[in-house]
């Protein structure tokens, strides 16, 4: 590792080719087993997880009659969560720490919401630009503020996910580099701190996938 940020470089692999991006396909290979494996604890856990998220996202979307509407948000949650967790393993590239990955997920989703909302529910989209109870003097300013907040949504979604992944990995890398030059008396405390940070980073990896999916669901609920 030549510098601190080389762990986020996609080309630091064999023959200087971007083979690190193929780590994102490992999650798809792991999930494909459910189509041919017999019923086991892994499948039971996946069914319980997807059913729980399905019930929660239905409440957020207010779509009790439209079956299958929440599948895109559940699949996105599982994809981000598994990629975040796989990035904690040694020598595995964290694809969700790059804007190439996060913006690719957030921008098409937001654009599809906007196109569908302005073509099918134009009156509702205009209503969202001015919150109820806004004084007449402040209405032009509220329209500008709401329009800006709508346009920066894909950026905030992608930056939030990438920044959280980069911050946790940088802290773990800094502590890992300092453990090579400290005394043996401080080494047990450093190991305990690293284990606690790794546990925290595991929780952050799962929470960020959930936050990304919930915010996308809330953005979709405004279109109805």
Image (cartoon, rainbow, N blue to C red):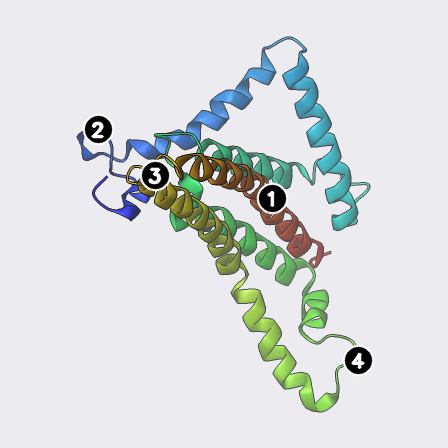
Q: Nearer the viewer, mark 3 or mark 4?
A: 3
Which label sits on residue 133?
Answer: 4
Q: Quadrant of residue 33?
A: top right
Image side of residue 126 versus residue 145, left or right:
right
Give the secondary structure at mark 4. loop
Quadrant location, the N terminus: top left
Distance Cα–Cα, label 3 vs label 4: 58 Å
Q: Nearer the viewer, mark 1 or mark 3?
A: 3
Q: Residues within 10 Å of mark 4 (few under 14, many from 20)?
A: few
Q: Position of residue 128 (x, y in %)?
A: 70, 69
The residue shown at (33%, 38%) is 183
Q: Residue furthest left?
A: 15
Which label sits on residue 14?
Answer: 2
Between disc 1 and disc 2, whose residue precedes? 2
Q: Nearer the viewer, mark 1 or mark 2?
A: 1
Residue designated by label 3? 179
Q: Residues within 10 Å of mark 2 (few under 14, many from 20)?
A: few
Give the secondary structure at mark 2. helix
Distance Cα–Cα, label 4 vs label 1: 34 Å
CB contact under 8 Å: marks 3 and 4: no
Give the secondary structure at mark 1. helix
In the image, 95 versus 37, the foreground residue is: 95
Count of numbered labels shown in the rendering: 4
Q: Position of residue 120 (x, y in %)?
A: 67, 58
Between disc 3 and disc 2, whose residue precedes? 2
Q: Nearer the viewer, mark 2 or mark 4?
A: 2
Residue designated by label 1? 207
Give the secondary structure at mark 3. loop
CB contact under 8 Å: marks 3 and 2: no
The residue shown at (66%, 24%) is 46
The residue shown at (62%, 63%) is 118
Q: Nearer the viewer, mark 3 or mark 2?
A: 3
């Amino acid at each position: 590792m030549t510098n601190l940020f080389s762990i986020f470089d996609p080309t630091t692999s064999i023959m200087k080719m971007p083979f690190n991006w193929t780590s994102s396909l490992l999650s798809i290979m792991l999930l494909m087993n459910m189509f041919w494996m017999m019923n086991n604890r892994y499948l039971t856990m996946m069914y319980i997880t997807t059913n729980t998220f399905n019930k929660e996202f239905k409440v957020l979307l207010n779509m009790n009659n439209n079956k299958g509407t929440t599948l895109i948000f559940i699949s996105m949650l599982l994809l981000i969560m598994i990629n975040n967790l796989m990035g904690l393993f040694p020598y595995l590239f964290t694809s969700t720490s790059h804007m190439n990955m996060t913006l690719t997920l957030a921008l098409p989703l937001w654009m599809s919401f906007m196109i569908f909302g302005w073509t099918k529910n134009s009156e509702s989209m205009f209503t969202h630009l001015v919150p109820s109870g806004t004084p007449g003097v402040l209405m032009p300013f509220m329209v500008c503020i709401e329009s800006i907040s709508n346009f920066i949504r894909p950026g905030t979604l992608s930056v939030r996910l990438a920044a959280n992944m980069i911050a946790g990995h940088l802290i773990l890398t800094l502590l890992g580099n300092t453990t090579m030059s400290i005394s043996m008396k401080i080494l047990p405390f450093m190991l305990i701190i690293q284990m606690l940070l790794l546990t925290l980073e595991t929780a952050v990896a799962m929470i960020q996938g959930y936050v990304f999916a919930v915010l996308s669901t809330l953005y979709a609920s405004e279109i109805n």
